[in-house]
Image: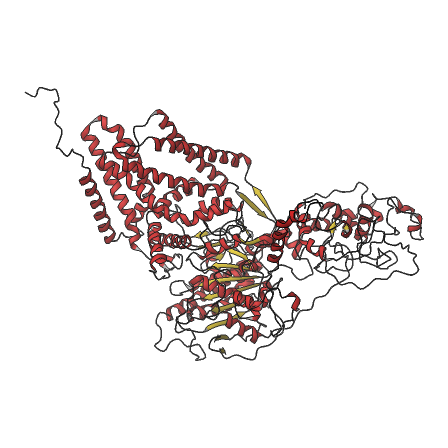
Amino acid sequence: MNTAGRLIAGSHNRNEFVLINAEDSVRTKSVEELSGQTCRICGDEIELTDEGELFVACNECAFPVCRTCYEYERREGNQACPQCRTRYNRIKGSPRVEGDDDDDEDDTDDLDNEFDYGNLDSFHPHAVDALSVSRLNTSRGSHRNASRINGQSEHEPSPLHSEIPLLTYGEEDYKISSDQHALVPHFMDRGNRVHPMLYPDPSISSQRRPMVPEKDIAVYGYGSVAWKDRMEDWTKKRCDKLQVVKHQGVEDGGNDIDDPDLPMMDEARQPLSRKLPISSSMINPYRLIILLRLVILSLFFHYRILHPVKDAYGLWLTSVICEIWFAASWILDQFPKWYPIERETYLDRLSLRYEKEGKPTELASVDVFVSTVDPTKEPPLITANTVLSILAVDYPVDKVACYVSDDGAAMLTFEALSETSEFARKWVPFSKKFNVEPRAPEFYFSQKIDYLKNKVHPEFFRERRAMKREYEEFKVRINALVSMAQKVPEDGWTMQDGTPWPGNNVRDHPGMIQVFLGQNGVCDIEGNELPCLVYVSREKRPGFEHHKKAGAMNALVRVSAVLSNAPYLLNVDCDHYINNSKALREAMCFMMDPTSGKKVCYVQFPQRFDGIDRHDRYSNRNVVFFDINMKGLDGVQGPIYVGTGCVFRRVALYGNDAPAKKKRPSKTCNCLPKWCCLCCGSRRNKNEKKKKTTQIHALENIEGIEELSIEKLNVSETKLAKKFGQSPVFVASTVSESGGSRHDVSAASLLREGIQVISCGYEDKTEWGKEVGWIYGSVTEDILTGFKMHCHGWRSVYCIPERPAFKGSAPINLSDRLNQVLRWALGSVEIFLSRHCPIWYGYGGGLKWLERFSYINSVVFPWTSIPLLVYCSLPAICLLTGKFIVPEISNYASLIFMALFISIAATGILEMQWGGIGIDDWWRNEQFWVIGGVSSHLFALFQGLLKVLAGVSTNFTVTSKAADGKFSEIYMFKWTSLLIPPTTLLIINIVGVIVGISDAINNGYDSWGPLFGRLFFALWVIIHLYPFLKGLVGKQDRLPTIIVVWSILLASILTLLWVRINPFVSKDGPVLEVCGLNCD
């Protein structure tokens, strides 16, 4: 696309479309695809015979088959042509097989090869290659870009796209009658080549015989509709049987077996990833401990319920209710971790399969989304580093497009992105030339490592020093822009040419699109092409609901579909840069895997952070969730979507169901009456009708787009418009299987469509935010979006590369951390109170039960704040009143309590072992669970109830990411009152400990025994709140006076209340007893 580097602004509703200072748009040229003559079975080149003629296997129809497939069919198959079913004659150079007659052979003698199958030297070199690989591989990949055998022919094969399923020899399709089968060798591949008809040499005699269905395994029917329905099922079965086989040499010293291409060809056909189950020595004891813990919990509750505390019945009942809730929450959290797995990717196999030497790359395109809102709080320098890391990623440049969403329509972001595009022309070639990591310059130059390690290029030191100087100058220019943006002119911002900035009014401005890179003639300083970089700011008008981040992401989905339409999408926050340049390749190992990639809706990477203190006081790394819970979910149906660092399949975001796995039909007797199968038949008809809901749009009126036949329109245009909107170009992109932009549509038309799809009213009366794209209705749109995909039957994948794929910034002070948790908890409350609550939504779909448990736990956890707050208050109450929630403990009760504590510790230890985390991280997570539960979760619960039930909403503000050089999450509250509940708990428990010890000192030795249980209970609360206490008195944050006042006031009120209700002394006054001593 060529927009002459100008900004495109406009409003579809107002019929405005402005190309600011632009020249005429040019039309891009289309790309022609060539094809060659290849085998219709395996996809290899058809070799030449010794006489220099093209090899012809069948003299009846000249169906294109290579010698390898021909000989395999004769030896292992039905010895017949797959197309005309005529029996193959023996050709010179091929061994004799059972059933060969003298009349079936050519007129030439071939005694050397007639009875020799083992000597590979007698084969044509290409046949040797194919035959060797056919013995080493049991199947081929089902992906449309799967690798083929690179034979040693002088012709190079082209990519194949077959629509004709071929049944494997020895397998039977139960949906196809026996007279419609065609059996072919099991090492075939898919092809879609157009071959010229090959005619046999009239000088060579051929024996023709009529077709006899009774004697043949299959009859005519090649290319039937039943076979087309069989294609996906067949490729799935074949790929499931794919095995890794080592190459074996030949004792005869054949030179062809030592061909170096053979290992490459075999490697390219292996799976691109594999599962690595947790060792049985760790996972089996872990599961056993979980079951034992369930038994112990049942005994614990049996004892607790049957042994109430009569003199403290209220405290006892309250504690039992809280403990039952905690047990239910533990079950929801524990069982989704029953099948933890890890995964391993093979990047070399990905390159062998899709990046063949001398050919264009076949890797799929990826659109990368970067979201930002306010440049004064989200530093443009951080956003620029994220964009630079994307542009320098290790991926074909023509396959990457970066879209930056500026939801604040700030000219500062626009100008900073313009500077970034200029600096990228220098940074991208440098980072790729010397393979530096990470490829975000700010973090690369700040590394305290030996940057000369493993660098052997003599120019590296000089160029690195020059590049660092260039980056420092770039930072100065960005900082100058930030400084200039501090004071907004009275008339608003104007561009360099004097044009008023369209986004001067943040709440009322047109949509804007600017293509910075990816245009014709824009290259780096070395003359190489750069990835596409597009600035997008969606239209905003008063009176429209814009749905915050979810709405911005959906606008990017639509505009990217119009401009580039990559089949895969990556979304990152503006402060999450690509730390591993091969991150996209890691994701493609799952998405493009022909064995299991078709049902993968997204690949989620763990979040890793920079700038966190060594002790991780507030559990910012959250490693328990990312390294334990997510691994467990990966073994069920996949991890949940966490909002950033995730690669999506575009069709999954469109609300489509996952590809259905065809089940083998049950066999019924033909003699049964028709009414016996009535129910099954009606259910089958309903399923068939459901499968016909493929979205196809009438495209006759779209400029440059081919017309579709009326027979293919299974869905009305009205229904499609209701689902996707009124843009015909966008709807056309939704039905494109391979993706890619339209080269036969002018740039001006595409940009006009782009302005339309980001208009503020485009989503009205559509399914955007309901069934399509990011789902609306919660501030945690990530959980809701992933949940909807899993309900459609998709599965997700959790990828943990050795080098972290992405790194971001996390809050380091207590207030920002609590605000972050508050936003997550509020979103969970909104989902719980909506129709999408996993407790009652999504039944009958593709959501697995253990996956549902995880989603239920993710929306229920804020409700745990109430029993947790009450339970943490019980120790202080017990110490102040002298009562306890447990009666006098017997030996049996002591064993149960000890067993429960041991099982809890054992579960944590085993999780740390197979999760690979340290005890510090695990303990910090336990502590912050209590801190967040009694503060952020509690406030979020009441906030969510007010918002959903009473309609009281609180506006979100973006928290500054520039404080102390650290950066925090966006879209969050700023509540200083969050510190009040945990501070109150700390004070009353500390007061309780002091009162309890004083009372024991006054009452003598006998009172110390009962005191130990109460002290242990109170110290348990204080130890869990210790990081909070340290944060209050630490150097980083000054404790606000208002928090101290309110906390002391609440603690005093509660203390006086309990003393008034149940004082230490008897209501009748002190009890006086005779001590037995004569004081006189």
In this view, the residue in front, 231 or 554, is 231
Q: Give whichever of 493, 864 is nearer the camera.
A: 864
Q: Quadrant of residue 780?
A: bottom left
Q: Residue at x 31, y 48 (%)?
A: 1031
Residue 760 location in percent, x, y? 45, 70
Question: In the rendered view of the protein, which quadrant contains the N terminus?
Answer: bottom right
Q: Position of residue 1052 (x, y in %)?
A: 20, 45
Q: Could one spot residue 518 in this view of the protein? A: no
- x then y, percent, for residue 615: 39, 45
Q: Quadrant of residue 497?
A: bottom left
The residue lying at 21 percent from left, 48 percent from top is: 1049
Horizontally, residue 821 falls left or right of residue 22, namely left
Q: Quadrant of the C terminus?
A: top left
| Percent coordinates x, y for residue 546 in the rendering | 43, 66
Q: Is residue 722 visible?
A: yes
Q: Residue at x 52, y 52 (%)?
A: 790
Q: Residue furthest left?
A: 1080
Indicate left or right for 271 with 11 as reference. right
Question: Viewed as shown, does residue 402 lie left or right of 115?
Answer: left
Q: Is residue 696 above or below residue 905?
A: below
- Residue 1064, compared with residue 89, is above or below; it is above
